[in-house]
Image: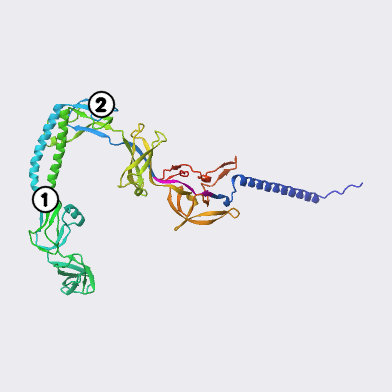
Amino acid sequence: MGMAPRESKAAVKKKRVRRTIIILLVVAVVLVAAVLLLRQYVTENYGSTDDADEIQSVEVTTGSIISTVSGSGTLTSDDVEEVTIPSSVTISTYYVSEEDTVEEGDVLATVDTDSVLEALADVQTQLDELDEELEEASEDAVSSTLTSSVSGRVKVIYAEVDDDVSSVMYEYGALMILSLDGYMAVDIETTDYAVGDSVTVVDSDGDSYTGTVSAVSAGVTTILLTDNGPVYQDTVTVDDTYTGTLYIHEPLKITGYAGTVSAVSVSENTSVSSGTTLLTLSNTSYSANYNQLLAEREELEELYQTLIILYKDGAIVAPISGTVESVSSTSSSSSSTSSMTGDNSSASSSSETTVVTINPNTSMSVTISVDETDILSVAVGQEASITVSSIGDDSYTGSVTEVNTTATSSGGVSVYSVVVTVDKTDEMLSGMSASVYITIEGVENALLLPEDAVQTTSSTSYVYTEYDETTGELSGMVEVTTGLSNGTYIEITDGLSEGDTVYYTASEEDSSSFSFGGMDRSDSSGFSMGGSNSGGGMDMGGNAGGGMPGGE
């Protein structure tokens, strides 16, 4: 046989290229198939990565929803009683120590009776001196009548019988106003007149008066007319062309500062002369000096009574039941117990020394800061939940007892202090940190949806009730009316019923996530499918949030 013809180098090279292409095509097919299989596996087990698979569905459920304002602070004991004695009295013996439990009326300490007698003599001397000063100051009492110091015409009377003088003065700045020169005046915006021109002024009742131009300046003409008849602040017309408001040309305000109006002796538009009685007052008080002396005497009377009780009992007794929080570290006051006179006597006898403090152990308070966006929602009496981390996870029910409307600045934001009070437990101690959640508003048996499921515009809110899996499109738009929101869920007050299904595009934090490393899939959708509800938590941003609020 003859030898087969040997292939040329070009033919061999051509075959190699063909085989390489075939191999590459096979590899490509295998890779495509692998990708398709992997994609199908992921789609079946973890959801597609298409936008359509980010669509979530949720049923309208019934539950409760609340909105809260939150803050934190430290516990402080309420109604702690400070037991005090005059600083000139000496303690003989204490019968209690810190943390002792006492009942109302228990003896806390005994006092040195000699020091009490010295203090009584000192206070009596001060009372005698004050009585002399009060006698002198009593001549400065407010007069029971108000009279006119000049002649004029009564144009305005603000005070009425039974009015409090100071209240009338606060509201109007005067009890009545007199006209002194016999003229009312009106200003009109024009320069068409000259000084001395006569004009016709017509009041709101149609009565006419002759007026005279008294001044023309800066585009304003001033016209004077009689004060006998025209009414103060009435709107008048000048020459059927210009209008203005009447005022008193030369007014005199009648003022006062104390007492009650018992009679008004004049009427509007009447003439009065110097010395004419305008008002009669009752319940007039004394001068400021007299009142100050009287207040000092009342304080001394209370001190005198305290000393009498100390002298009679010879001891200090507990005014309330509770636990002794502190006891003075010395057995006597730092002040000298010798008899004192003059100005120094007043200061020493009037001052007091705290000897024992007693905690009734009934309630505690927490003061929190609330910013300006929430303070108008907070009111006394609102329920609050208090947790004390050092005690445990238990929640205690309290209430708002004080809302301070004076702001302070914190980081450029106005904040207000709010006091919440809670019944004290044995575990609660002053200084413990506490978190407070004040219930601002709550709705029971509300129809609820996640906030992400509700779309909003400037004029309306709506939801989608239909979803086409083929096209991935949402439809079935239904307009809804929303109510209370807690930042996570929102109340639906109209447009939907319980059990209705709503579709929406999940936000990034709600969408499913997965990792290829171990095929570990985590679902952080933030709501429970099938309508099951979990108890709502509370966040620190001022809203009750967390899981779905508790259902029925």
Which mark is drawn over residue 96?
2
Alpha carbon of mark 1 to alpha carbon of mark 2: how far? 53 Å
Tell me, yes or no, whether the highlighted magenta stretch contains residue 54: no
Does the image show residue 330?
no
In screen coordinates, is 243 left or right of 150? right
Q: Are marks 1 and 2 in contact (CB under 8 Å)?
A: no
Please state the horizontal and vertical placement of residue 92, each as a whole percent of the image.
Answer: 19, 25
Using the rendered view, name the quadrant where residue 76 is placed.
Answer: top left
Please state the horizontal and vertical placement of residue 59, each as a whole percent of the image.
Answer: 51, 49
Write the residue at 25% across / 32% down. 320
Count the labels in the image.
Answer: 2
Q: Residues within 10 Å of mark 1 (few under 14, many from 20)?
A: some
Q: Is residue 446 above or below residue 215?
A: above
Please state the horizontal and vertical placement of residue 252, each as a whole percent of the image.
Answer: 14, 60
Q: Mark 2 belongs to which amino acid?
A: Val
Q: Residues within 10 Å of mark 2 (few under 14, many from 20)?
A: some
Q: Mark 1 belongs to which amino acid?
A: Val
Q: Which residues are magenta?
A: 57-68
Q: Secondary structure at mark 2?
A: loop
Does the image show residue 12?
yes
Q: Is residue 347 above or below residue 176?
A: above
Which mark is drawn over residue 142?
1
Magenta segment, prevailing SS (helix, strand or loop): strand
Write the residue at 14% across / 43% down. 292
Please state the horizontal and vertical placement of residue 532, each as a whole percent of the image.
Answer: 51, 44
Query: Foreground residue, 379 or 136?
Result: 379
Q: Secondary structure at mark 1?
A: loop
Q: Is residue 271 above or below residue 6?
A: below
